[in-house]
Amino acid sequence: MAFSGALTLTDLNDFISPSQACIKPVEQTNGKPKQEEYVGAKTEIVVDSTGSYYEVSSGSVELNTTTLPSRVNNEISGTKLEQAQISLNDCLACSGCITSAESVLITLQSHTEVFTFLEHNQDACDDTKKLPVLSIAPQSLASLATALSASLSSSSTSSSSPITPLQVLRRVTTFCNSIGFPHVVDITFARHLALQEHVLEFEERKERDSKGGQDAQGALPMLASACPGWICYAEKAHAEMLPFVATTKSPQQVMGTLVKEWLGTRMGLTPDKVYHVSVMPCYDKKLEASRQDFYNDVYSTRDVDCVITTGELELMMKERGWDLSVPVPGELDEDISFGSLPQSLVNSNADDIRFPELLQHPGSSSGSYLHSIIFHLQRKSDVPLTLTSKVMRNSDYEEFLLTTPTGKIAFKGAKCYGFRNLQNVVRKVGRERGVRTAGGAAGRMAGRATGGGIRDRMKRKAGAATNGAGPEENADDKGYDYVEVMACPGGCVNGGGQLKPILPKNGNQTSTLGTSGAAGTSVDAEGYPRDWEQNGGGTGTGTDTVQTQSGVVMNAKWGDKDWTGKVEVTYWLTGEPSSLSSAISGSGSSQGGGMAWADEMAVRVLTEMCGSDDDEGVKTRRRLFRTEYHAVQSDVGNGLAVKW
Ligand code: SF4
């Protein structure tokens, strides 16, 4: 299977330098050569014209011809070396390849894989047939909607109203139904559950922190866990940060649990009888889905079987001749009949297993993790807490304070997007918590400095927990309680798997967007025109825009701030204004139908999956909605310092 050509080095300004060595041990299966055959020999690795590797002897000792099937040239013969096969599952996130997803290893998850599955599934017998389910991220819908709106406004003289993510969801649902997915959902309900769990975990950590001593170690600040780019980075480069990272599963993985464990059960299907595809704004989500932690040993299946990006979904539609710009019947209707299962597939009432759609969780377009905690604290506080914010280095790094009427700081959090900001925050948290931060690529658990950091010293001085009475703290001295960490600058709306910016038509150049590779070297495998030089690949074509079939000129470069801003605006176009607290409380105190439905549904799902709140129920909930992290061990030196 071909690896998507859309994966390249892109925004080098925000890139961690990759290391040169992949640290995955490669099993040598060639017969062990006899020691004497090599005595005195000088060996080299040579690559022939077909790209095969040979270990060759340039010394005087002749090698045994039975182990030397190939002759590289007239003077040197050698042993053909076996190529290392590395699949996604082997990725140790070791920094041995490019940062923004270790993407050169991703070969097992692609849109062609989805097509292949659907084809085989159609003809499968009852025993092996699976139920295909597709879930899609709201950022992906926003990206598709923004591109559609830009295409339409560029190709039409009259101004048209923007396409909303809800309309795109309807059209994508209709397309997916037509190719064999009877069930299509967006992942915002899974995010609703993830946010509830996240808040619960924050409360647990806060309590641990207030106790001090051993219990408090690694409790606060809690660092967000939904971004696999950040998780990979922490596991390979800053293992000392792992105790601070929330253990709550990301919305993608919560949706995986819902689809396989809840929906499947309700339909009388075991997890292996459901095939779950998720559409995500980045390639890192493929790595996340492939983690061993999300593998079901009993049924030999994963919570998410295949992850495709927004671009790959668009490519699927193009390959099947589906025009996303054409409205589908009823797409503007309020009555939501999309996303429900055909009655023939359902053992119970379809309404019973429909998830609420496109819930808006106010705060950020990357999931509102920070704001879910802020709103929760405001809601449960006995005194009114005032929220203020301050932009730090740039809009991707902002601090948020909750203060009491007397000026006491009840909470300090931050939103931190992009690797540059992220590294600064890691250092800051390390200083505050008295944790020595790792300087190298491989995850070495750094020793905890004795005596505590600034935060601990502040706490000793204050003699009180962070939320409550006590001497006033200076905002600059107070450590963070929570940080919403995301690897992409601009957050998930700017993920590497999103559609590329569409610029106004200038008609200078032509291409055939949608016919993969047809336009030559300036078009990537997903059919997108690419400026390889600007993106770090450097093919030397010097072209960065091409005209598409609809006459729209597209710029291939990711990270376009104006474009990201437009996707951000589109992201918030759909959905009802919701009660801030209801989004996270799970208390049922919501305003608005969608959120009320979500709260009720959340209670129902949790009760059915976890039972009551007793010890057993708590254990089940943790098993289903939490995960763990693993420091990557390596003998490789400071890989991050190595430049290619
Ligand atoms: Fe993926 Fe980027 Fe969002 Fe992280 S911030 S989850 S890498 S899109």
Image (spheres, rainbow, N blue to C red):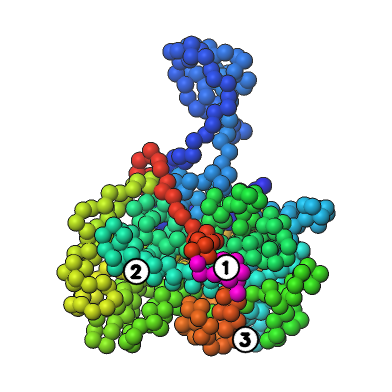
Numbered disc 2: secondary structure: helix
Q: Residue at label 1?
A: 611
Residue depicted at x 73% and y 62%: 268
Numbered disc 1: secondary structure: loop
Of labels 2 and 3, earlier in sequence is 3
Mark 1–mark 3 Cα distance, whole angstroms, equals 47 Å
Mark 2–mark 1 Cα distance, whole angstroms, equals 26 Å
Q: Residue at label 2?
A: 206
Residue type highlighted by circle 2: Lys
Q: Residue at label 3?
A: 161
Residue 53 located within the stretch drawn in magenta? no
What secondary structure predominates along the stretch shown in magenta?
A: helix
Residue range corresponding to the magenta coloring: 604-614
Residue closest to the eye, 519 or 444: 444
Residue 605 located within the stretch drawn in magenta? yes
Residue 612, can we see it?
A: yes
Residue depicted at x 56% and y 82%: 595
Of badges 2 and 1, nearer the viewer stands: 1
Residue depicted at x 52% and y 85%: 590
Residue closest to the eye, 358 or 217: 217
